[in-house]
Image (spheres, coloured by chain):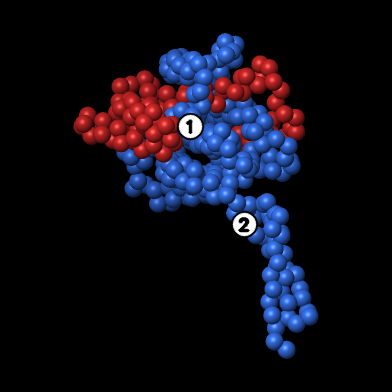
Amino acid sequence: MKGRTRRSRDENSTTAVTGAHIPLKVCAGSNCRVFYHLGMRTTPSFRHGLRDGLPVFLAVAVFGVAFGVLAIQAGLAPWLAIISSVVIVSGAAQFALVGLIAAGPGPVLVATTGLALRHLPMSAKLADLIGDRSLPTRVGLAWVLTDETFGLTLRASQTGVPDLVTYKAAADVMLYSAWVSGTALGAFVGRAIEPAALGIDVLFALLFLGLAAPLIRHRRDWLVAGLAVAAALLATVVLPDAWQITGAATTAALIGTAVGD
Amino acid sequence: MTDLVLIVLVATVTFASRVVFLARRRRVPDGLMGRFLEVFPLALFVALATSGLAAPEGSLAVSPALGGAVGGVVGAVATRRSLIGTILIGAAAYWLTRYLAG
């Protein structure tokens, strides 16, 4: 008897990345078996996230190389540099870590706490944007809640991307893969590369400028932007490095909140 | 304390700050908190951009990064606030300023 193969898929699945159990039905005559595998279906929102995440991927990869090089120079073993990128996923916190590691755990933890405080309003805003989702989904999104992917997601919410969770997951994949692989590259073979010579820090600043631009819509937004510039300049003079961004952003946002529309 | 323990502690602090509001199911209320969250991202991104462009080495300085800042603003206006346009025109202005400054 001539065998035949037939496939059926759950077209209603909206899962965009690994985790979707897609049935694959294989028949030989009347004898059919259904196999399940982890599917890699993509949706328009996922592809949109990958596309928008490309410039972030390129910048973060080079930044990751810079971190890998500095971590080795600070005395971290290559595998520890990579582990830090896998579990922390925060350029600012990790640069503070390698910069202060010689000073001991106290200064490192104080600095990273100051840097981490800015995640609180980002976390609250993202929770508001994605609405009612399962706990694993929300925890997964929190894992790579960085300035870059948060900014992209916020921008996507204003341009009508239908599935923000999928969009952010794609942007997270881009950022996470770039950060970890860049760190590994820098830790093992990056000594010959000099990221500062390429002006990577300036590219990041321009990325944030590009993320801020679409958020300026009302008169109040101009006020907040102006206040943030002034507060950031002032913070550079009066605050320790680790508290400058959090302090400046919080001050500008508080005044903007008080002023209202 | 070993380096690995310190890395785990930093990861814990960072992740806790990221997950604290996402772990709750409640939506952010209106009012002051809602308004604060509305403007905080803008303040954050502008502060990050200002810090990187006006103080790339950690302290205020006149540097080619300021040329990048001007280019970035021009790029944002010229390309109707396109992310790529802002980055590319800003980066071109930065490298041009750096070249001209020697």
Quarter of the figure that contains the N terminus of chain A: bottom right
**What chain is tagged by disc 2?**
A
The residue labelled by disc 1 is: A211
Q: Position of residue B75 (x, y in %)?
A: 36, 31
- Density class for disc 1 (Cα within 10 Å; few <14, some 14-19, many ≥20) is many
Give the camera-side residue of A75 and A221: A221
Q: Where is residue A146 in the image (x, y as percent from the top left)?
A: 55, 36
Q: Where is residue B34 in the image (x, y as percent from the top left)?
A: 65, 21
Task: Please report whichever mark, 1 or 2, sits nearer to the chain's N-terminal start.
Answer: 2
Q: Is residue B30 above or below residue A195?
A: above
The chain coloured red is B
Q: Is residue A120 left or right of residue A241?
A: right
**Residue type, mark 1 in image:** Leu
Is disc 1 in contact with disc 2, using a CB cutoff of under 8 Å?
Answer: no
The answer to whether any part of residue A193 appears in the image is yes
Q: How far is disc 1 from disc 2 in space, using C-alphas? A: 28 Å
Image point (44%, 43%), residue name:
A55
Where residue B8 sits, quadrant-wise, is top right
Image point (68%, 17%), residue name:
B31
Where residue B72 sits, quadrant-wise, is top left
Q: Is residue A57 left or right of residue A144?
A: left
Q: In this view, does A117 lie above or below B11?
A: above
Which of the numbered marks, if any, corresponds to residue B20?
A: none
Image point (78%, 79%), residue name:
A31
Mark 1 and mark 2, same subunit?
A: yes
Which of the numbered marks, if any, corresponds to residue A41?
A: 2
Q: Where is residue A134 in the image (x, y as percent from the top left)?
A: 74, 42
Quarter of the figure that contains the C terminus of chain A: top right
* Shade of chain A as shown in the rendered figure: blue
The residue tagged with tag 2: helix, strand or loop? loop
**Residue type, mark 2 in image:** Arg
How many marks the image carries: the answer is 2
